[in-house]
Image: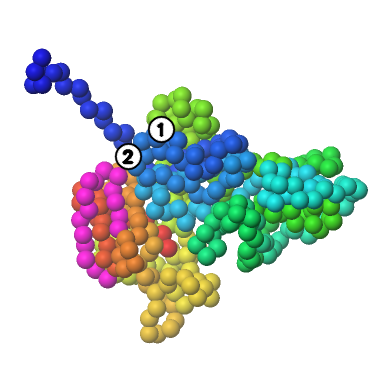
Amino acid sequence: MSAAALPRVPATAPAPLWSGLLAVDKPEGLTSHDVVQRVRRRLEARGAGHLGTLDPGASGLLLLALGAATRCVPVWQGGEKTYDATLRLGLVTSSQDVHGEVLERHPVELDAARVRAASAEFIGALEQVPPMVSALKVAGERLYRLARRGEVVERAPRQVRVSEWTWIDLELPRARFRVRCSGGTYVRTLAHDLGQRLGCGAALESLRRLRSEPFGLERSITLDALERVPRTEVLATAGIPLDQALEVLPTLVLDAAAAGQVGHGQRPALERRAIEATGLPLEGSAAAGPGARRARHRGGAPRTGAFLPPRRVSVGRGHGPRVVRRAGSTGWAARSRSASSTDSISGIASFSIACANGRIGPAARAWW
């Protein structure tokens, strides 16, 4: 049979592009990177990344950003985290959990009241020194790689905050607790530091992340289910579309004229009460803070409301909001889920807007 006579095999249609967050219930024994790779392969995602590392020995909520959501990751990284954890007293290890090399063993001659009192001292703002076995970088190299070579380097303390520490079970030398803390807090280090305060040492035995505000495990999917159920069901069960995920940000709805001004990098004049209702800082106000992106003008006093171009803008025309991303240090870009190209609109901030019809729609949402 000639090559021309061979039957044509139809090409497999690529999976439709989807942008948003996926909530995965990570099992113990896998790295966060392992989970990202499996999700990317299963969902045929063009881009994927996690919002916060879970140690291989930990389980629970791992949020993954897919598609255009990877450009908005900082929006969700600052949320408080809630963990269910178990520690073992009388043990000091190289990694601050039971998986590391045992460095010290001590008798545990404590009662529950003393443990509760000691943990109360960790509620509030803390200075925490990150553990050597962590993914943080010092001089461009991951700490855990230095630790594997037996090196110990100085680590600068970081500001963290513990909002809640509740004991669930105190069957010493094991103790189970629930902790709510700021992003970037090492629960392993909390357990280690508590053991140092008690004088007997402590190491984390298990860790499960329950929440990464404002998202929880209640709508997550396991990796087993991820492999078994259809793609559409995976996204319906554990997917959070990007427009919904961005609802955590203050929102200001613009009319057609204001949307056009923003598209050209201009500052729209807005009603003061409309701005105040969103909780956004007015220019010149103390609440805005020195680093806020607020408009400046010669008069010095707040006007009706003139703002610098916002960090994110979504433009809609009956098809849902569009996705916006930062485009370099001097410009902004928006990409439509249904548009294959962008139309450039030159202006102060050099916006590129993509809508289903190639124009700015009658309404837009702007996030500062």
Judge whether 188 appears above or below 141 on screen: above
Q: Is residue 184 left or right of residue 37?
A: right
Q: Which mark is residue 257?
A: none
Please identify the quadrant where the N terminus is shown.
Answer: top left
Q: Secondary structure at mark 1?
A: helix
Q: Residue at x 47, y 77 (%)?
A: 284
Outermost residue to the top: 1
Q: Is 284 colored magenta in this rendering?
A: no
Mark 2 and mark 1 lie on one chain; the one further toward the N terminus is: 2
Outermost residue to the front: 149
Please identify the quadrant where the C terminus is shown.
Answer: bottom left
Badge 1 is on which residue? 42
120 vs 311, nearest the viewer: 120
309 vs 135, nearest the viewer: 135
Q: Is residue 304 left or right of residue 77?
A: left
Q: Nearer the viewer, mark 2 or mark 1?
A: 1
Q: Amino acid at mark 1?
A: Arg
Residue 211 visible here: no
The answer to whether the residues at label 2 and label 1 have Cβ atoms under 8 Å apart is no
Badge 2 is on which residue? 17
Judge whether 66 appears above or below 200 on screen: above
Q: Residue at x 38, y 85 (%)?
A: 298
